[in-house]
């Protein structure tokens, strides 16, 4: 117990000593800054002392001396920056003064009435906002839309709802959109009208409807050109802005046209030596990969699933009749394995060194270095195939798409136990000690097993590579839509003729 009290007594002065050292250092620093007339830095040093020791009389007295000159410096600096139109720098100076005033008040000190820092700060913001307002008006008059928007947004950030800022934002966004509309920059124009419709407190249904009409017209154009996924994106954007901008059934039509129903079959040339069951597994693997990696527009038909409603050619109940041209694409992909070749390279050998332990039961009775000659054979293989795509609506068959994959596997083995070359001298041994043991030696001796395992690994690698490459080619062929540029002109009616 006495030992604990002694230890506790020792710890207290140590902790106090560290704090005391910091206090002394900051007081010396503050005094040095005060002597150099760097009142702001002196005030910060005195404030640090008061955070450690709120009742420190030297720090309070010092802060009381330097606070007034420090704030006066900040106010003077802010006025100088403002005269140079450097409002951001002036704001930083006055923010620093406000923070210093808060520290003075928290220390229980007070300054004279000549330092109305908060009023100075608010006055600066008012003048800054008025400056932005003048610049925004000038930019708007010169049709410098981006500059006008930037100035008006800064006003809104500093003084939300200031004068006519929000109404003027609507004007600028709308004028900008109309200008881009005249220049046939349709998508950009729609973005401007959307911004006009979202100005706080200034709901503009006309701008929203105009933006939605443009996006709906772009969607109709994309649908007419067969860019179904682009059409869906544009229709959805239109509906987000104005839900009634797209006629009922049009989006469903685009969704149906964008969909591809894919059936897949796998075949093989009997000379490849593969079993039919293995080819079935290959087809199943490709179907799985295509389903996992394809987009939401690609539906892989699973045989025997009993659920083919998304690819059912009949129109869904309760919806208008859908023309044959508006049905999903139906593609049959046939993957044919045309050849498989496996080669074995001539064996090479190398010596490998192992540190071997000799044991009697669980007891280690000796150690030696063992050199083993390991033989190595590399098995390489190539699989080739083709993919044929059949459009089941038109009957059109694509030319076969050839592809090729390759892989390697290595077999390692030793010829027999005579391949062991023991070198070095045992640390200690007895006649009852077992033969030097090398981990995995029994496995390495079985040459036929090693070769068979290498062939199996090679076959599995080729299988996976073949499935992955076939999947890539199928998706590249049936699950992609070329990018389409915006049209040179569009019908800006509520809906284009393509939607009729």
Image (cartoon, rainbow, N blue to C red):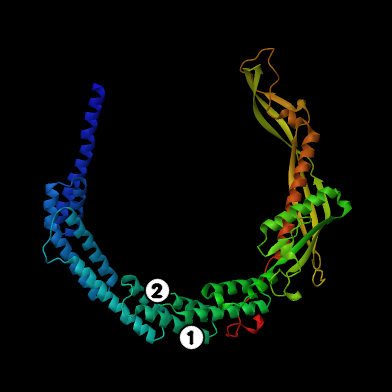
Residue where numbered disc 2 is placed: 200
Relative horizontal placement of residue 495, taking residue 209 as reference (left or right) = right
Vertical relation: 426 (above or below) 382: above
Give the percent coordinates (x, y) of residue 71. Answer: 17, 63
* Farthest residue, direction right: 271
Query: Which quarter of the figure has residue 117?
Result: bottom left
Residue at 41% in and 85% down: 143
Relative horizontal placement of residue 174, taking residue 464 as reference (left or right) = left
Neighbours of disc 2 within 10 Å: few (<14), some (14-19), many (20+): some
- CA distance for labels 2 and 1: 23 Å
N-terminal of the pair, mark 2 or mark 1, is 1
- Residue 337 visible, this angle: no
In this view, the residue in front, 137 or 402, is 137
* Farthest residue, direction front: 318
Q: Nearer the viewer, mark 2 or mark 1?
A: 2
Residue at 55% in and 80% down: 214
Neighbours of disc 1 within 10 Å: few (<14), some (14-19), many (20+): some
Residue at 66% in and 16% down: 361
Give the percent coordinates (x, y) of residue 192. Answer: 47, 78
In this view, the residue in front, 214 or 54, is 214
Query: Which quarter of the figure has residue 345?
Result: top right
Residue where numbered disc 1 is placed: 179
Vertical relation: 381 (above or below) 251: above
Which image quarter holds the N terminus? top left
Q: How many marks?
A: 2
Secondary-structure class at tag 1: helix
- Asked if labels 1 and 2 touch by Cβ distance under 8 angstroms, the answer is no
Give the percent coordinates (x, y) of residue 351. Answer: 70, 33
């Amino acid at each position: 117990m006495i030992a604990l009290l002694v230890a506790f007594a020792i710890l207290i002065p140590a902790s106090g000593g560290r704090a005391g050292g910091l206090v002394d250092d900051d007081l010396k620093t503050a005094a040095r800054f005060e002597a150099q007339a760097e009142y702001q830095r002196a005030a910060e040093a005195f404030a640090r002392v008061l955070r450690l020791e709120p009742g420190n009389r030297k720090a309070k007295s010092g802060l009381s001396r330097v606070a007034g000159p420090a704030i006066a410096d900040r106010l003077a600096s802010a006025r100088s920056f403002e005269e140079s139109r450097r409002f951001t720098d002036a704001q930083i100076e006055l923010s620093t003064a406000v923070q210093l005033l808060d520290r003075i008040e928290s220390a229980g000190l007070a300054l004279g009435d000549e330092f109305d820092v908060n009023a100075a700060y608010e006055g600066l913001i008012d003048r800054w906002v008025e400056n932005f307002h003048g610049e925004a008006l000038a930019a708007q008059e010169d049709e410098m839309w981006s500059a006008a928007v930037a100035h008006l947004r800064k006003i809104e950030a500093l003084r939300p709802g200031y004068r006519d800022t929000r109404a003027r934002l609507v004007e600028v966004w709308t004028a900008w959109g109309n200008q881009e509309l005249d220049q046939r920059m349709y998508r950009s124009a729609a973005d401007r009208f959307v911004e006009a419709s979202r100005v706080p407190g200034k709901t503009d249904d006309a701008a929203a409807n105009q933006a939605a009409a443009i996006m709906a017209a772009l969607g109709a154009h994309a649908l007419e050109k067969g860019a179904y996924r682009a059409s869906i994106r544009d229709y959805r954007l239109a509906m987000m802005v104005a839900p009634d901008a797209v006629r009922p059934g049009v989006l469903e039509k685009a969704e149906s046209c964008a969909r591809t129903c894919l059936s897949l079959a796998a075949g093989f040339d009997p000379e490849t030596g593969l079993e039919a069951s293995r080819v079935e597994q290959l087809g199943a693997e490709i179907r799985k990969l295509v389903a996992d990696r394809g987009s939401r527009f690609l539906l892989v038909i699973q045989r025997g699933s009993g659920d083919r409603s998304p690819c059912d050619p009949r129109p869904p109940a309760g919806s208008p009749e859908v023309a044959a041209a508006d049905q999903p694409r139906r593609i049959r992909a046939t993957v044919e394995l045309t050849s498989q070749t496996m080669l074995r390279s001539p064996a090479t050998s190398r010596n490998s060194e192992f540190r071997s332990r000799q044991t009697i039961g669980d007891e280690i009775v000796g150690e030696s270095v063992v050199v083993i000659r390991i033989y190595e054979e590399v098995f390489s293989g190539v699989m080739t195939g083709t993919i044929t795509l059949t459009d089941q609506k038109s009957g059109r068959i694509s030319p076969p798409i050839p592809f090729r994959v390759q892989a390697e596997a290595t077999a390692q083995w030793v010829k027999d136990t005579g391949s062991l070359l023991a070198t070095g001298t045992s640390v200690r041994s007895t006649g009852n000690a077992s033969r030097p043991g090398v981990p995995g030696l029994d496995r390495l001796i079985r040459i036929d097993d090693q070769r068979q395992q290498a062939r199996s690994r090679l076959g599995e690698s080729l299988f996976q590579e073949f499935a992955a490459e076939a999947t890539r080619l199928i998706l590249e062929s049936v699950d992609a839509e070329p990018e389409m540029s915006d049209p040179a002109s569009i019908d800006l009616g509520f809906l284009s003729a393509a939607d009729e």
